[in-house]
Image (cartoon, rainbow, N blue to C red):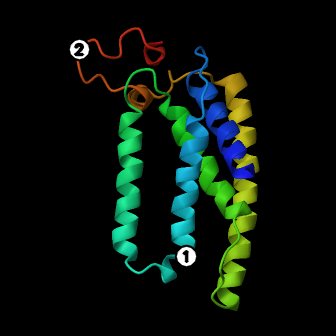
Amino acid sequence: MLIYFTSAIGGNLTSSVFVPYHATCGSGGAVYGLLGVILVEFIQSYQVVSRPGRELAKLLVVIVICLLIGTLPFLDNFAHLGGMVYGVLSAYLFLPYITFGSFDSGRKVCQIVVALLLIIFLFIVSLVAFYVVQGTGWCRGCYYINCIPYTKHMCKNTFSSL
């Protein structure tokens, strides 16, 4: 539950930085945060997975397809990406882990500390950026993260074209 809410808040905060003049709602950031949790869970316990390469490929295909669907109009890919980043960091912070020795245990403690510091840092940077930057004018390619014009008028009159 904590990971879900952290991903939702982080995704919506990221969305508010990049698309400040359009109100969005929904659980997109939180759901993508849970995809990030699955990715971290796989990374942390790949030693017990029978075919890790195959399973990682399946997971990455699902993530890529979901992100490509997010490039359609009126879907907020900034919230999705932000939720995934916050979900990955929250997973390192809150999930219990199997340890395979003292070195692995120490490595996971370091990951927890780094994840906590990164979540705090990203949250502060996102808040400052929300009040200072607001918008994607400084990033020409960021427009295509939210809506790719697959047809001539596909992204016209969407919040991505602001």
Q: Position of residue 121 (x, y in %)?
A: 73, 47
Q: What amino acid type should be assigned to the residue bearing mark 1?
A: Ser
Q: Position of residue 21 (x, y in %)?
A: 59, 14
Q: Which residue is mark 2?
A: 152
Q: How crowded is the residue under tag 2: few (<14 C-alpha within 10 Å), some, or many (20+)?
A: few
The front one of 142 and 40 is: 40
Q: What amino acid type should be assigned to the residue bearing mark 2?
A: Lys
Name the residue located 41 percent from the left edge and 81 percent from the top edge.
50
Distance, label 1 to label 2, CA atoms, is 45 Å
Q: How crowded is the residue under tag 1: few (<14 C-alpha within 10 Å), some, or many (20+)?
A: some
Quick check: 90 above or below 5?
below
Quick one: which residue is furthest to the top in this view? Answer: 157
Foreground mark, 1 or 2?
1
The front one of 25 and 119 is: 25
The front one of 138 and 11 is: 11
Contact (Cβ within 8 Å) of mark 1 with mark 2: no
The front one of 61 and 103 is: 61
Q: Is residue 61 left or right of residue 21?
A: left
Tell me which corner region of the image, top left, top right, bottom left or bottom right, holds residue 7.
top right
Q: Position of residue 39 (x, y in %)?
A: 51, 61
Q: Secondary structure at mark 1?
A: loop
Quick check: 142 above or below 97?
above
Name the residue located 72 percent from the left edge and 23 percent from the top edge.
131
Q: Which residue is mark 1?
A: 45
